[in-house]
């Protein structure tokens, strides 16, 4: 049956028209049904238990309890208790994990009914956090041979996060040019066209089929369990798009009990810092409403939610109205097999603000941008099937369809630009344990894109890849990984791109809590259809964009040495040194073209780059874990090796400090973020677009503060939080010609009903 699915995935690449995608999905579903004929019929036992803190014996609420190598799992209730009804007799390893504690596991005995007690060791240092992105399988963070950062769901709740990128700004080595992500200076600025970072949701990619961009606002943050960020070249396992790193959003598992949750928030922007910036006498408000539910029966589980967001904006013509819906359904075909379907929809209406009129009118758009609106509709449907065939072998199949529609209209409803795009990705992966110290991973991936747009034209693209990886554990503390991936990508009518990318990694644990990692890998990124074919005069400036059909893929070689050290029970130090060489980087090129007598912009392979740097993170807690403080620093030395000039739109220094104090029922927190002044920008863009006063930029110093009241302690399932963002009203810009948000206050209420 594995061969059947491989043939199904490959067959989609031979279909010239997207309408045949329906036939592909039918074949995939048929293959999955064939694989589920081996229904589990063995007997099992009931296992109950309790999870408590070793420190004071207090019950741990919401701890994850799973039976290893099965689909069986649950979470602890308000008393820390759990129940597993029908555990197969041949799979008895029970694993327990919880935020703020070290993970633990036990092998159950051979009795008909068992009761287990797990006493977890408190630790803010999450060295044993289970991650999946680094090597496409579950493993402890301590076993991973590359640098990773983990964002837990609590970070989103505390900051009243509306969009995923709001929290990613505090990840070591991550920076943003407004909505465009940059990991370790791998990316400059291209207005979202062609991302060098791959975004995944539950392991399936979410890059648009036309521009290959990331829309962070489309991710339902209230459904996020955690986010894993892998730095460096991830192409050895993830292919084109992962040149600078991978961001994998993992959604929450469905609660064991029927649960309804809700959230309301409202906020207000402070007045502009200067009277001459004031463009409206009205108070600028924001608000949002969310509601969701989850329920589970014996074999099936469903979670769904909807959200509405309204934001008047602090700048003229920067209002937004957003609507989203999320659905996740899981069915356990047996204790060894499960199928999960997710659907996510995001619709947005907004004004179009590209850059300011001038520095004296910093909150007004340039005249050429006035009275333009943008509407977009994006949705993705994904299906995943996982089968634990034996204790040593499991495989999973994934398929996703990502649709993106967006339109730019003038005030008189004249259509300026439009694009309708589809992207389909299907993957089959298998993991085999050979003995107790050898894990082999292999997979095949197929992708298909279709674009219909006045700005890009009508185009089709496809590709495929095969990847192999072997992880060998020499001793308990020493492991080595070698991997290889071969990709080919093609836009129909243009040349085919292909490359083989190796990956090597070594992890050595000197003693518990002290680990050194070495890694090296090669990557590539094929140009997106948007980079190849964009052609428009509707740029909001005097420039016109012309096609760039001769673009070549980008290439990279990345090296890293890193370490993590638990200096004490509550103090962890993480360090990393990295070196990356990039060739044929695709960058926007602005020039005064005498042939067409106009200012033109296109994409070219113009940069050979070398990026070196280091990261330093200190994570600590004290006062019986009631206070936690994290500090991060990232240094980037990013130069063009041909000219010796510093790369455009990259910061040299990034730092942050995050502090939390919990004194039940109160919670207090503050964040400080620093980004050094961007050293080099595109002077031609400023001069020729033109962007008046566009060279004005400063270092970023942003302080956010928050306080919360958790009424659960009083038997009321409600939590209230007040956030003050940009507390000191600092005026800064992440992108040229764009003032970032001023001080604003947000009050939120959320609750859970069970």
Image: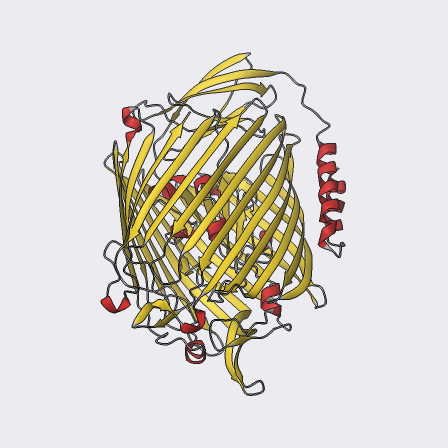
Instruction: Judge from the rendering whether residue 220 lies leftward or rightward of residue 56; answer left or right.
Output: right
Q: Residue 319 placed where, x, y %? A: 40, 57
Q: Residue 75 placed where, x, y %? A: 46, 27
Specify the farthest residue to the front.
412
For the C terminus, the image quarter is: top left
Asked if residue 16 shows in the view, the reply is yes
At 73% from the left edge and 39% from the top edge, which residue is drawn? 2
Q: Nearer the viewer, residue 466 or 713?
A: 713
Q: Quadrant of residue 366?
A: bottom left
Q: How many marks?
A: 0
Instruction: Judge from the rendering whether residue 505 lies leftward or rightward of residue 309; answer left or right.
Output: right
Rendered position, 391 above or below 10: above
Q: Residue 110 placed where, x, y %? A: 56, 15
Rendered position, 86 above or below 147: above
Asked if residue 146 shows in the view, the reply is no
Describe the colour scheme in one phrase: secondary structure
At 25% from the left edge and 31% from the top edge, which residue is drawn? 665
Specify the farthest residue to the bottom.
594
Q: Nearer the viewer, residue 461 or 188?
A: 461
Q: Residue 306 placed where, x, y %? A: 48, 40
Q: Nearer the viewer, residue 454 or 575?
A: 454
Q: Quadrant of residue 23?
A: top right
At 55% from the left edge and 47% from the top edge, which residue is drawn? 480
For the N terminus, the image quarter is: top right
Q: Quadrant of residue 450?
A: bottom right
Instruction: Judge from the rendering whether residue 319 lies leftward or rightward of residue 191; answer left or right.
Output: left
Rendered position, 79 above or below 512: above
């Amino acid at each position: 049956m594995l061969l059947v699915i491989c043939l199904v995935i490959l067959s989609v690449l031979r279909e010239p028209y997207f309408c045949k995608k329906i036939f592909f999905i039918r074949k995939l579903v048929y293959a999955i049904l064939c694989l589920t004929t081996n229904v589990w019929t063995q007997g099992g036992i009931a296992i109950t238990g309790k999870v408590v803190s070793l420190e004071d014996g207090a019950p741990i609420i919401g701890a994850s309890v799973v039976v290893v190598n099965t689909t069986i799992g649950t979470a602890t209730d308000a008393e820390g208790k759990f129940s597993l009804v029908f555990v197969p007799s041949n799979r008895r390893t029970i694993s327990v994990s919880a935020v703020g504690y070290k993970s633990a596991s036990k092998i159950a005995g051979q009795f008909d009914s068992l009761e287990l007690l797990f006493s977890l060791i408190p630790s803010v240092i999450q060295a044993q956090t289970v991650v999946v992105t680094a090597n496409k399988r579950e493993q402890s963070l301590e076993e991973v041979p590359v640098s990773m950062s983990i964002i837990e769901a609590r970070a989103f709740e505390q900051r009243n996060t509306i969009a995923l990128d709001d929290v990613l700004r505090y990840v070591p080595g991550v920076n943003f040019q407004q909505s465009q992500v940059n990991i370790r200076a791998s990316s400059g600025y291209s207005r979202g066209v062609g991302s060098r970072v791959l975004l995944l949701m539950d392991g399936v990619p979410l890059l648009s089929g036309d521009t290959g961009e990331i829309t962070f606002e489309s991710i339902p943050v209230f459904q996020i369990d955690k986010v894993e960020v892998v730095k460096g070249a991830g192409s050895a396992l993830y292919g084109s798009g992962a040149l600078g790193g991978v961001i994998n959003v993992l959604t929450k598992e469905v609660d064991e009990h029927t649960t309804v949750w809700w959230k309301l928030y409202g906020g207000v922007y402070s007045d502009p810092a200067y009277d001459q910036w004031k463009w409206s006498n009205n108070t600028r408000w924001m608000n949002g409403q969310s509601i969701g539910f989850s329920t589970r029966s014996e074999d099936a589980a469903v979670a769904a939610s909807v959200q509405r967001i309204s934001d008047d904006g602090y700048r003229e013509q920067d209002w937004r109205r957003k609507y989203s819906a999320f659905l996740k359904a899981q069915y356990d075909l047996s204790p060894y097999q499960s199928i999960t379907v997710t659907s996510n929809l995001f619709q947005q209406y907004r004004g179009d603000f590209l850059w300011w009129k001038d520095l004296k009118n910093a909150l007004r758009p340039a005249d050429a941008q006035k009275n333009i609106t943008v509407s977009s509709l994006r949705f993705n449907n994904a299906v995943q099937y996982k089968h634990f065939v034996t204790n040593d072998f499991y495989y999973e199949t994934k398929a996703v369809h990502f649709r993106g529609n967006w339109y730019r209209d003038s005030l008189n409803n004249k259509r300026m630009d439009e694009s309708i795009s589809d992207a389909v990705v299907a993957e089959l992966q298998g993991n085999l344990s050979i003995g107790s110290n050898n894990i082999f991973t292999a997979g095949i991936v197929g992708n298909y894109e279709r674009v219909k747009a006045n700005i890009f034209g009508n185009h089709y693209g496809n590709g495929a890849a095969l990847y192999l990886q072997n992880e060998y554990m020499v001793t308990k503390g020493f492991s080595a990984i070698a991997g290889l991936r071969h990709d080919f990508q093609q836009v129909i009518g243009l040349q085919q791109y292909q490359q083989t990318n190796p990956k090597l990694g070594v992890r050595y644990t000197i003693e518990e809590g002290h680990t050194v990692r070495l890694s090296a890998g090669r990557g590539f990124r094929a140009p997106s259809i948007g980079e190849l074919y964009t052609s428009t005069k509707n740029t909001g400036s005097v420039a016109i964009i012309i096609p760039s059909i001769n673009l070549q893929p980008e290439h990279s070689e990345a090296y890293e040495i890193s370490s993590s050290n638990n200096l004490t029970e509550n103090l962890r130090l993480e360090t990393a040194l990295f070196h990356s060489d990039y060739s044929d980087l695709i960058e926007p090129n602005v020039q005064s073209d005498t042939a067409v007598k106009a200012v033109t912009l296109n994409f070219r392979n113009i940069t050979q780059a070398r990026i070196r740097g280091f990261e330093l993170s200190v994570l600590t807690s004290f006062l019986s874990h009631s206070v936690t403080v994290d500090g991060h620093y990232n240094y980037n030395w990013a130069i063009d090796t041909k000219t010796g000039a510093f790369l455009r739109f990259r910061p040299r220094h990034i730092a942050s400090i995050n502090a939390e104090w919990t004194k039940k029922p109160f919670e207090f927190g503050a964040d400080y973020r620093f980004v050094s002044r961007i050293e080099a920008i595109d002077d031609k863009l400023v001069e020729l677009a033109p962007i008046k006063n566009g060279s004005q930029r400063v270092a970023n110093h942003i302080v956010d503060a928050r306080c919360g009241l958790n009424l659960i302690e009083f038997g009321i399932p409600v939590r209230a939080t007040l956030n003050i963002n940009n507390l000191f009203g600092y005026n800064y810009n992440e992108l040229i010609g764009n003032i970032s948000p001023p001080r604003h206050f947000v009050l939120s209420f959320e609750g859970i009903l069970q």
